[in-house]
Amino acid sequence: MGFWGNKSVVVALGGGIAAYKTLELIRLLREQGAMIHPVATTSALQFVTPLTLQALAGHPVYQDLFSPLAADAMDHIRLAQQADLLIIAPATANRLAKMATGMADDLLSAMVLARRKPILLAPAMNMAMWQHPATQRNVLQLQADGLHLVGPESGALACGDHGVGRMAEATQIVEAARRLLSPQTWLGERLLITAGPTREDLDPVRYLSNRSSGRMGWAIATAALRAGAAVTLIHGPVAMAPPWGAEAVAVESAQEMYEAALHHWDQWTRSGEPLSAAILTAAVADYRPASRKTSKIKKEANSGLQLNLAQNPDILAALSARAADLAQNNRRRPLVVGFAAETGAGVAAEETLLATAKEKLLRKGCDLLLLNDVLATGCGFGSPTNQVTLLHRSGQHEVWPLLDKEEIGERLMQRLLSH
Ligand code: PMT
């Protein structure tokens, strides 16, 4: 059963045009296994129909506190008390004001007052309304009362303005909801993660690169963020937007990734807020063209092309050396975790891969190394799944089964806690 499989969520709609996005939110949560109970205020039903909500949620829509249809109003209140999460999307300026003052003049506000479990608000309104001191006062009050917010985002608004006030996208609300319900085992900790490929320019139109999609690093960053960690994700060119909430640093070449990683490591080592771990999933080019041509290399008739390559600096080895220095000076040292992308086939090859990975761990000096055979089915580059073997510096290793990369991220975060 996935994360949402045993969760019940009350999704309540306030009266705003963004209500159409809440339909997608309900669809996504239900698709992932959550049990959804929709609630709509009278004004929300000016924008979406009860039939649509019921069809998407698979449950009837709770509306007015005193309507004959809601004869069992106390049951609805109980439902709101017991559900794992109450999401209010869109949360209008009027709804925020009602909640901040503790009013209970409709079903939704009564539910909010009766609830002692998490409430997530996704505000949506015109920019001027959002920026109004009264709204900002109400938001502060609601946060002080323990309610959580996702968004609003900046962008084109329904009124034609451009600015802050757009309701967060459905995927972002689902992610915020998941973080809210996840154990915050990494709260207050900080991670550095590298991900994706690097690009080594040959000339202005060509480069050397590899097949990394960034998915492995994204999955670990997502798991860390869900567990409450602050994440800096240094990544090469990938097709995905960074996970919501990560500090993303986009680079191209191995040299740029090296400089960015060392810069962030040193910055935190000097600050009073040191890193807890560095996890290097990036497929960093070992070599780059010794010189980058300033104009396109021309094809010459009947001749091949010799490339002269120079070695790139090794980020994993450099961070491991820095960690060792900290330990020597009796300072708190982050854990350094690498990956090993190897290619093999068959059982005989497994032993060889393991031996190669053990040698790599010792040579680069990291604490842990995750070995993956990138030619194995369902593994490696671009795949949503992977099969890894976790090697410890002590010489022990654990073979993990084929898992979603997200599950590998979760397992790794748990292992690091107990390391
Ligand atoms: O991004 P995906 O499509 O999801 O694919 C995931 C992955 C296959 C890229 C990932 O699981 C993986 O194996 N990453 C490591 C790729 C790699 O470069 O392996 P390596 O064995 O060549 O390097 C060993 C370690 O040294 C890695 O942690 C690497 O980040 C690091 N390294 C390598 C070279 C270099 N110059 N600097 C480094 O820090």
Image (spheres, helix red, strand yellow):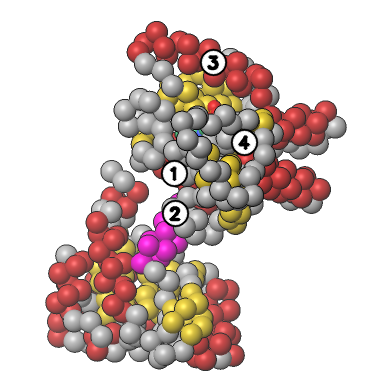
Q: Which mark is residue 356?
A: 3
Quote the CA–CA distance across marks 4 and 1: 20 Å
Q: Secondary structure at mark 3?
A: helix
Q: Residue at x 22, y 77 (%)?
A: 62
Quote the CA–CA distance across marks 2 and 3: 32 Å
Are discs 2 and 1 less than 8 Å apart at CB? yes
Q: Which residues are magenta?
A: 170-182
Q: Which mark is residue 240?
A: 2
Q: Which residue is mark 4?
A: 288
Q: Residue at x 58, y 46 (%)?
A: 203
Quote the CA–CA distance across marks 2 and 1: 9 Å
Q: Position of residue 59 (x, y in %)?
A: 17, 67
Are discs 1 and 3 less than 8 Å apart at CB? no
N-terminal of the two: label 4 or label 1?
A: 1
Q: Which residue is mark 1?
A: 213
Q: Is residue 303 left or right of residue 13?
A: right
Q: Position of residue 56 (x, y in %)?
A: 19, 67
Q: Secondary structure at mark 2?
A: loop
Question: In this rendering, does residue 257 appear at all?
Answer: no
Are discs 2 and 3 less than 8 Å apart at CB? no
N-terminal of the two: label 2 or label 3?
A: 2
For badge 4, the amino acid type reads Arg
Q: Residue at x 45, y 61 (%)?
A: 176
Asked if ligand 1 lies within 8 A of label 1, the reply is yes
Question: Toward the viewer: 132 or 368?
Answer: 368
N-terminal of the two: label 2 or label 1?
A: 1
Question: In this rendering, does residue 205 appear at all?
Answer: yes
